[in-house]
Amino acid sequence: MKKTQGFELPDSLKSDHHRAKKLEYWTLGYMVTVIVLLYFTMGSSQAMKTAWTEDLLTLLPPLGFLIAAKVAVKPPSKKFPYGYHRANSIAFLVAAVALFGIGAFLIYDGVAALLKKEHPTINSVSVFGKTVWMGWIMIAALVYSAVGPVILGIKKLPIAKKLHNKVLYTDAKTNQADYLTAGAAGLGIIGIGLGWWWADAAAALVIAIDILHDGYTQVASAVTDLMDRTPRTVNEKKYDKVVYDIQKLFNELPWVQSAEVRFREEGQVYFGEAFVVPKENVSGLIDQAEEARKQAQSLSWRIFDLTVSLVKQIPDEQTEDLKETETAAQ
Amino acid sequence: MAKPRTYAQVLSIFLTLLFSQCKPFPKDPEKTLQTVRGDTLKVGITENKPWTDLSGSLPQGVEVQLIEAIAHDLKAEVQWQRGSESALIEALKEHEIDVMIGGLSKKSLWAEEVGFTRPYRKEAVYVGVPQGAALSDIKGQEVGIGERTAFAAYVKKKGGIPIRGNVLGQFEGPVAAYAWELQRMGLQNTDIKLHEEEKSLAITRGENAWVMYLEQFFDNHQQEINDWLTTAPEP
């Protein structure tokens, strides 16, 4: 049985991967402090509770990334001949489903608070003999909860693109948008202060809708990845151009009459096949095919595993071509 | 010379006006603090000695004194409304009363129904013995509890046998009471802690100016609250 190679990243990206892991550990550490802080300041505010839950959820992508990073590099075995690359995709799906489910629950919770006309009570604390409204302390905690993730998100985003890692990318995006959550919750608190009891639940709903929306897009993306859709760029906006390039490469070879390729994503790398119909009377076909495979793989480190299949005619030709306009420029 | 001063005065008046628009912050959705001030303070009261005592013609107890001091500060008249705890909670939910007292704690059944102030006092129930006597454990021991049913439960939890219906000061043997009560009765505190509780007042949920006012009052009157304990009814 043929087994695929071991470590998936080229040496040039190893330092980026290491940095990503470090950033994710930082994220975990920082978010734990945020979660403890918000827990002790949230009082009876629905918006604070929702923001807290979202912060709790932001632990999932870093955990998923770190666990997948350990699992995905395991060498293929007899039992798992394609290796463990999909660990990434599974981590992504699990995190996405959690996000979606909790988003839905928080929307229910927020609507219920609105319908029950829940008036949140916010007490005060005595600080050095002064009576301070807890609302101010909540807002301070929210600011703290946003500063770290935003900075970490900005640092993680370019690395995620380089590594073609969707878990990391999603994580970076969520972190970057954390100030919106904190801002919404902060407005809710100020609303309470102005005597608008509904502001709190309304802010909570805004945050919950955002969580649900993130969850929905991520579930959709994770499911389509697992359904072996043609690889898309890490932001999910376009098809990866490298697939198109390989198709072109095979078709332009002098010994090839026609060729068709297909790829799928396995975590951060691609697996695929090239079906090649050679011209008649070509000599050294095996060497030629081997050479073409090497060329294709040299186009990108993401072309992790490529099988070149010499055929008399292309099986089940796909009827529609992927639109070139939808393909990303590299 | 007069001109800059006039500008400064105008500016300060303007700023004062601006800030007074935002004050108080936080605000009450139901305007409790605003309506109570200079008018009537509607207080729901349920008996729970020594915090509230309804045995006389007028309410007495530590929390009654606290309410009277608050009313004085707000130049408001107190209107007492007696009732069971659950009836008063319902009244409070609908904002029929402004505040409810009766030795309540934030950790009560009602935490979801109404709002609570930050505790004005942390309390602990201890076992006391006559001076010179010693006691390390109340397991199997008879402990006097006076008329406080709740204390019977605390004694039982620690394996003791609660003895009810006595005047604590005259009970021969260990008694359960608050630390300051033991001191007042001249008993020795054994440091056997039976229970901890935090005393709060209940308010209509979301009345944040009101709760802030009350908590500020607690912060500024800790000394008086301590003094009132010395005049609380005997257990």
Image: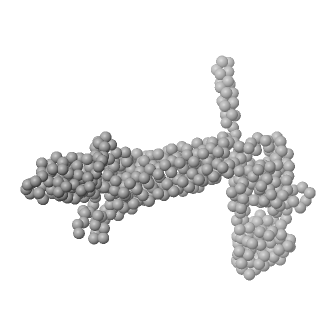
- Left or right of A243 on screen, residue B194: right
- Left or right of A265 on screen, residue A152: right
| Residue shown at 71% from the left, 56% from the top | B113
Instruction: List x then y, in percent, for residue A92.
Output: 41, 57
| Residue shown at 75% from the left, 66% from the top | B179
Q: Nearer the viewer, residue B152 or A204?
A: A204
Q: Is residue B167 visible?
A: yes
Q: Residue furthest bottom?
A: B140
Instruction: List x then y, in percent, for residue B18.
Output: 66, 31
Q: Is residue A21 visible?
A: no
| Residue shown at 48% from the left, 47% from the top | A178
Image quarter of residue A269: bottom left
Q: Nearer the viewer, residue B45 or A201?
A: A201
Instruction: List x then y, in percent, for residue B36.
Output: 79, 43
Q: Nearer the viewer, residue A155 or A298?
A: A298
| Residue shown at 70% from the left, 39% from the top | B24
Instruction: List x then y, in percent, for residue A142.
Output: 54, 47
Q: Nearer the viewer, residue B98 or B224?
A: B98
Number of numbered markers: 0
Q: Is residue A191 above or below residue B135?
A: above
Pick the quarter of the image with the N terminus of chain A.
bottom left
